[in-house]
Amino acid sequence: MDDLIEIVLEEAKEEVVVVMRYALIGKIVADRALNRRGVLNVLRSIWGSKDLEDVRELGKNLYGLSFRTKKGMDFALSNGSWSIIDHHLILKMWDATKAVKEFEFNEIQFWIQNGTY
């Protein structure tokens, strides 16, 4: 029992900062879990591989989105509202100091077209 093994873990702060640099967290407002593959396909079709670097499922209808550029991320934040399989997507800046469960998705941005044709 004298053969103890010590494991030293290194923090990957710099790598995390790079990944989180242009990251958003998104919640799809739905009463059921949507098909993961369908959601990923829609997200990739909206922003394309030119802007969207990676998408990760974080929970039920909850996704992490990593963009290649600040411009791509800002476009996603500023040009909603976004619809995923007929459900609203709420996007927020990803604050790396918060746990995923600490994010609140209690506001929805949408637009209404008013007028006659």
Image: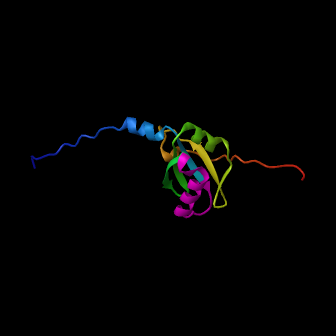
x and y percent of residue 9 in the render?
28, 41
x and y percent of residue 84 in the render?
63, 57
Verify whether residue 92 appears in magenta. no
Q: Furthest-right residue in view? A: 116
Residue at horizontal 56%, vertical 54%? 44
Residue at horizontal 49%, vertical 40%? 98
x and y percent of residue 51 in the render?
55, 45
Q: In which quarter of the image is residue 35?
A: bottom right
x and y percent of residue 43 in the render?
58, 54
Residue at horizontal 41%, vertical 39%? 16
Color theme of the render: rainbow
Q: How many labels does the image show?
A: 0
> Would residue 81 appear left or right of 20 to someone viewing this image?
right
Note whether 97 is above or below 25 in the view shown: above
Q: Furthest-left residue in view? A: 2
Note whether 70 is above or below 36 in the view shown: above
Note whether 34 is above or below 11 in the view shown: below
For the record, the magenta segment spans: 28-50
> Would residue 3 appear left or right of 113 to someone viewing this image?
left
Q: How would you classify the magenta stretch by its main secondary structure?
A: helix
Q: Furthest-front residue in view? A: 50
Verify whether residue 29 appears in magenta. yes
Residue at horizontal 75%, vertical 47%? 111
